[in-house]
Structures are given as C-alpha cells and as structure tokens.
Amino acid sequence: MADDVKAAARVEPVLDGRGLRIGVAASRFNDHVTVRLLDGVRRGLAGTGVEADDVTEVWVPGAFELPVAANGLIRSGRIDAVVCVGCVIRGETFHFELVAGGCASGIQQVAATTGFPVLFGVVTVDTLDQALARSEPAGGHNVGEEAALGAVEMARLLQGLRPA
C-alpha cells in the first residue's frame, strides 16, 4: 500500500496548455498586488503553451466579486478553466474574515456546481509584506503563476475524464 501511495505522488501533471481557453478574473482592490499576481498568471499560462489570444481577462471591484465573474466566464462558453486572483489583507475589523471566507467558499461553490476548474489565486494575508512575498516577479513565489498551472492541469484532467 505504501508503495502505491509513493507511486501516486510521483505522477507528473499534464501541463500542456496548447489550445486551452482560460478565463482570468482579477480584483481591483489591492491592485498593487493583484497586478503582480496577474503577471504570474500570464507567465504561467504562456509557459504551458496557452496563447495570449486564448486568455480572457476581466476585472471586478474586489475579491468578494470574483465568484460571480468566474461563473460569468464559465457561462460564456468560451473557456476551459478560470483563474481568480486577488488580495485580501487583514485589517482592524472582522471584514477580512467575511471577504476572505466568502471569496474562498464562493469560488469553491462555482467550481463544484459547474464542474469547471476554478482556481484560487487569492492571497489572504496579515500584512502587505506577506502579500508581496506571495506575488513575486519571475523566478520567485507567485500564487497567480501556481494557480495558472493548476488551471491547465485541471482542464486537461477533466478533458481526459470525458466519455469518448
């Protein structure tokens, strides 16, 4: 049994994005971080072969609105997966918990109810320094880039599960 688990852990994801159409929903709030995440998404998608013309980007006011945008992208019929990027930084009130939790559960609900990959590229942090550390430029840690790779992997996985 342990060998089966080890073998499963070594399976490499399919990261061939050629021909995939990806939607990206980005939050304007904290856009000094979100733009860095979006750059990571673009870098990740390009690295897998997704053409720039096959990427649809939309902007929303804040992270709380990302699930609605993701649902709209899916309903357009023009995409294979969605990446949501945003940044929620803890403040002095309970607002952080409401926005971060609502965003996360909303994105999960859209994915579960539509059956489409909807990736969570939203940083939810205590400080701006933490947000910047999770949205580094090329070569560094970037949650947007990680979400882009996840979108390609999940789109290919689901394509492989479709009946012939």
Image: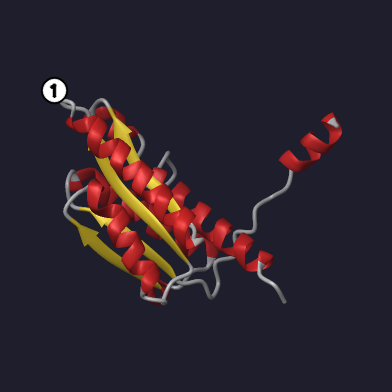
- Left or right placement of residue 84 versus residue 159 in this view: left
Report crowding for label 1: few under 14, some 14 to 19, many 20 or more residues within 10 A (C-alpha): few
Is residue 131 shown above or below 83? above
Is residue 126 shown above or below 26? above
Which image quadrant: the C terminus? bottom right
Give me the residue at 33% from left, 55% from top. Answer: 39
Give me the residue at 35% from left, 68% from top. Answer: 73
Closer to the camera in the image, 56 or 38 = 56
Give me the residue at 46% from left, 57% from top. Answer: 113
Closer to the camera in the image, 104 or 3 = 104
Closer to the camera in the image, 147 or 116 = 116
Is residue 39 shown above or below 87? below
- Residue 135 figure quarter: top left
Name the secondary structure under disc 1.
Answer: loop
Whether residue 89 is visible: no
Residue 86 position within the rendered picture, expressed as x and y whole percent measured from the top left: 28, 46
Residue 54 position within the rendered picture, expressed as x and y whole percent measured from the top left: 42, 74
- Residue with the mark numbered 1: 92
Residue 7 position within the rendered picture, expressed as x and y whole percent measured from the top left: 80, 40
- Left or right placement of residue 31 versus residue 163 in this view: left
Give me the residue at 28% from left, 58% from top. Answer: 68
Q: Residue furthest top?
A: 92
- Residue 72 figure quarter: bottom left
Which image quadrant: the N terminus? top right
Report the amino acid beneath label 1: Glu
Residue 2 position within the rendered picture, expressed as x and y whole percent measured from the top left: 83, 29
- Left or right placement of residue 66 versus residue 157 in this view: left
Whether residue 82 is visible: yes
Q: Residue furthest left?
A: 92
